[in-house]
Image (spheres, rainbow, N blue to C red):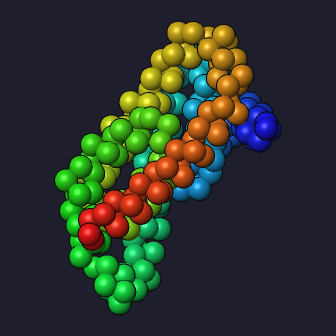
Amino acid sequence: MRLFRPIYDRVLEWSRHRNAHRYLAGLSFAEATFFPVPPDVMLAPMVLADRDRAWRLAGLTTVASVIGGLAGYLIGWLALEVVLPLVERFGYLDAYAAATGLFETWGIAFVIVAGFTPIPFKIITIAGGALLMPLPGFIVGSLVGRGARFFLVAALIRAGGERMADHLRDRIDLIGWIVVALAVVAAIAIVLSGGAAGD
């Protein structure tokens, strides 16, 4: 089912617009909170169109994504204000505390890995806020993980040219469904880890 190709093609249109840099920043921000298409698909054709600006574009994508991640963190934190009294009321406060401890222990490494891989970054940003991950570590992990990913994409497109960009478009639906599947798996894992910590 080609659900993601039309979205991808719309993003490609944005990449050719005179305000493409603003669209790239907006897409990078939105993807860290709710949007299903990763900013790589807009970054790639923009780098292809102007290879001399590859690193600047990768930097813009990274910064906007991290700012979007902070918005996701805030969403998780605000949800916590609503949910935590219910957690305490139903006797899961100890499980929550244990899960928070695990996230604090492995959080930075997990954020780095999630920022680099196809694991949906929005899951990590919202979970980070909900579990009160230390904010400095969250920011550092986001910068490292997202920066590594977007600078790698920029480097590959800068070196590989149109063939690399076409390769990305041909596989966008597969990538999109993998991202959705990983989002579901990550959400289940977070729920189960909280439940296991309370046993």
The reply to whether residue 70 is visible in this rendering is: no
Residue at position x 34%, y 67% in the image: 195
Quarter of the image with the C terminus is bottom left
Q: Judge whether 152 appears above or below 121 on screen.
A: above
Residue at position x 48%, y 17% in the image: 155
Residue 88 on image: x %, y %: 32, 85
The reply to whether residue 104 is visible in this rendering is: yes
Q: Judge whether 175 appears above or below 69 on screen.
A: above
Residue at position x 36%, y 82% in the image: 87
Q: Seen in the image, is 108 located left or right of residue 167? A: left
Q: Judge whether 197 appears above or below 24 on screen.
A: below
Q: Seen in the image, is 90 located left or right of residue 6? A: left
Residue 148 on image: x %, y %: 38, 30
- Pick the front one: 96 or 198: 198
Residue 113 on image: x %, y %: 36, 38
Q: Judge whether 26 appears above or below 173 on screen.
A: below
- Pick the front one: 49 or 28: 28
Check the image and name the residue furthest to the bottom: 89
- Pick the front one: 108 or 101: 101
